[in-house]
Amino acid sequence: MLHKALTELLQPVVNGLGYELLGVESLSQGRHDTLLRLYIDHPEGIGIDDCEAVSYQVSGVLEVEDPIRGQYTLEVSSPGLDRPLFALEHFSRFIGQQAKIRLQRPLPMAEGAPRRNFNGLLLGVEHNEILVEIDKVLYRLPYAQVDKAHLVPEL
């Protein structure tokens, strides 16, 4: 729930600067340290100056609101080639591209063992399910169970 609360807190700040907040990650860095990573985007791309501007404003909000226990390091990043997918709209936006999706728990399969990891072609979104094709087989992945997802860059 920390991600949702942080997103709600920081979204207006990032949007107010003219950027899109794609998502928030928090990664444990030992017992008392956290890496807080924000992914931002802009139609003209993201440069180091953009990341610095967002970092400066977000740092001020985090200092005042203090939503994170213990020490943390703030990192503001562009989505990069392996763009993370945080929201259902992100999956819709990148239909036709390859994505790697990990679910919170294995999904029972009609044939074979349950699986948790999927790497395939995004076909669409229907009724809060992500449609992915892998080896000409269609999978319907419940969005509510997505743990992590990102695009697979075509090189």
Image (tube, rainbow, N blue to C red):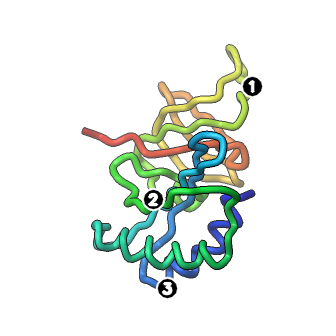
- The total of numbered circles placed on residues is 3
Q: Residues within 10 Å of mark 1 (few under 14, many from 20)?
A: few
Disc 2/disc 1 C-alpha distance (Å):
36 Å
Q: Residue at x 49, y 85 (%)?
A: 16
**Quadrant of the snapshot with the C terminus:** top left
Q: Residues within 10 Å of mark 2 (few under 14, many from 20)?
A: some
Disc 3/disc 2 C-alpha distance (Å):
19 Å
> Camera-side residue: 5 or 132?
5
| Amino acid type, residue under disc 1 in the picture | Pro
Q: What residue is shown with label 3?
A: 16
Q: What residue is shown with label 1?
A: 108
| Amino acid type, residue under disc 2 in the picture | Glu
Q: Which mark is residue 66?
A: none
Q: Is residue 112 left or right of residue 153?
A: right
Q: Which mark is residue 75?
A: 2
Q: Residue at x 55, y 31 (%)?
A: 118
**Quadrant of the snapshot with the N terminus:** bottom right
Q: Residue at x 49, y 61 (%)?
A: 74
| Amino acid type, residue under disc 3 in the picture | Gly
Q: Earlier in the sequence, mark 1 or mark 3?
A: 3
Q: Earlier in the sequence, mark 3 or mark 2?
A: 3
Disc 1/disc 3 C-alpha distance (Å):
43 Å
- Asked if marks 2 and 1 touch (Cβ < 8 Å), the reply is no
| Label 2 secondary element | strand
Measured as percent of width and height from the top left, residue 65 is found at: 67, 76
| Label 3 secondary element | helix
